[in-house]
Image (tube, rainbow, N blue to C red):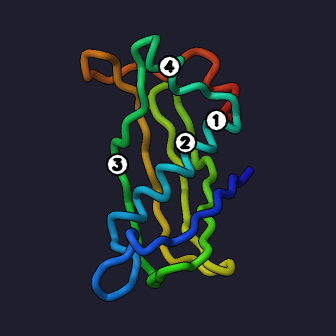
Amino acid sequence: MTHHFPVRVYYEDTDLAGIVYYANYLKFIERARSEWLRDIGVDQVAMKAQGVVFAVRRIEADYLSPARFDDALVVASSLHSATPARVVMDQAVLRDGQALFTCRVTLVCIGANGRAARLPAGLAERLG
């Protein structure tokens, strides 16, 4: 199942050349992952209260074509794989169905001590 999250490019997202600054794609995909988790019933605030949060462990990204001010974009997110220790997602930023940015993101959980932790119980079922 693919989750779709709309994003509008604002002036603040662009650089001097008038295109989306490369690091802002990471913000777009972060927002989309948060909304995807919310939509499948994962409460990240409750997770944090239990002492566990998500952290990006690895990201592989390809910048394919620039987005510009006022573009209407969609971030498409889908689960690639999940284990008791990590979640791997594929994400793409699209304009009119054309991929501008693609990435594979590996997420892990960390505890309050900053060390790796298992995914919370029940999360695997929600990811399924």
Outermost residue, top direction? 50
Question: Pointer 4: what residue?
Answer: 47
Q: Nearer the viewer, residue 95 or 120?
A: 95
Distance from the alpha carbon under mark 1 to that under mark 4:
12 Å
Mark found first going from the N terminus, 1 or 4 = 1
Which amino acid type is marked by label 4? Met
What x and y, as percent, mark residue 95?
61, 78
What x and y, as percent, mark residue 118?
44, 20
Q: Are marks 3 and 2 in contact (CB under 8 Å)?
A: no
Q: Is residue 89 above or below residue 100?
A: above
Mark found first going from the N terminus, 1 or 3 = 1
Mark found first going from the N terminus, 3 or 2 = 2
Question: Pointer 2: what residue?
Answer: 34
Which amino acid type is marked by label 2? Ser
In this picture, residue 102 sits left or right of residue 73: left
Which amino acid type is marked by label 1? Arg
Q: Are marks 1 and 2 in contact (CB under 8 Å)?
A: yes
Mark seen at residue 38: 1
Distance from the alpha carbon under mark 3 to that under mark 2:
17 Å
* Residue at x-position 46% and y-position 34%: 86
Distance from the alpha carbon under mark 2 to that under mark 4:
13 Å
What x and y, as percent, mark residue 110?
35, 24
Question: Pointer 3: what residue?
Answer: 58
Near mark 2 (Cα within 10 A), the count class, few <14, some 14-19 or many ≥20, is: few
* Residue at x-position 50% and y-position 19%: 47
Q: Nearer the viewer, residue 57 or 19?
A: 19
Q: Secondary structure at mark 2?
A: helix
Mark found first going from the N terminus, 2 or 4 = 2
In this picture, residue 60 sits left or right of residue 90: left
Can you tell which of label 1 and label 3 is closer to the viewer? 1
